[in-house]
Amino acid sequence: MDPQQRILLEVAWEAIERASLPASTLTSKATGMFVGVMHQDYSHRFRHADDIDLYTAAGNAPSVLAGRVSHALGLSGPTLTVDTACSSSLVAVHLACAALRAGECDIAIVGGVNAVLSPLSTAAECRAHMLSPSGRCRTFDNNADGFVRGEGCGVVVLQRLSDAQLEGRQIEAVIAGSAVNHDGRSAGLTVPNQRAQSELVQAACRAARIEPDEVQFIEAHGTGTSF
């Protein structure tokens, strides 16, 4: 089994415990599972037919990252794994919020996981000039020469605000709005499009019903990639 599946199971349970949600609540309500993931490094170890057994397919399929948690916890809501590269987990949050607003689920467990388990994905990103030769991610710096890979897993439990307040949940934060778009045709497949990114920020502000000058803190995804 891909270690990412095992890690996600553990951290999902930790998030549920922190939210003080008993298992009976998860199974009695429409609970969805949304996961963002980019790499499946563990599958690189299967190089020959003799390496494959009964559990290889389910143990390495991206869809099973979300499916295994729903299976283990008995969740009956929307269950999906999304890969939009570096934005995967945040797009999973976006989709979970949409599902909550649409009434497709009453509770959404949302997570992202990344474990570097093979040198091949690192080599591919090196060849694509994505990783920093100096081992430093100098975001917004003229000396930026790429990013540095990291590992981790994070899971949050989402509810509609009105439901969380009615049930007396400890509310850690409120997602006022979100937006997703694509660069479209830019200077290259992996080259950002300034216009598209500007439009995305404006769309997120509109979704949150706030003005840009009301934003007090920005946590940016700064890869430090040189173009």
Image (cartoon, grey):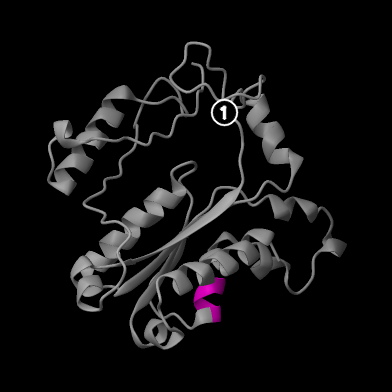
Horizontal side of residue 133 vs 190, given as left or right: right
Position above or below: 51 against 67: above
Residue 192 shown in magenta: no
Find residue 197 and report its horizontal and vertical position in percent.
Answer: 30, 30
Task: Give amino acid for label 1.
Answer: Phe
Helix, strand or loop for the magenta stretch, by majority: helix
Return the residue nearer the eye: 184 or 155.
155
Residue at figure coordinates x 73%, y 72% from the top left? 55
Figure quadrant of residue 201: top left
Say whether residue 83 is visible: yes
The region drawn magenta spans 67-72
Location of mark 1 (residue)? 147
Q: Which residue is at 41% across, 19% downward?
A: 187
Residue 123, image x and y in percent? 71, 32
- Seen from the viewer's position, the closer of residues 128 and 169 is 169
**Residue 86 point in image, percent of width and height:** 48, 41
Classify 97 as above or below 142: below
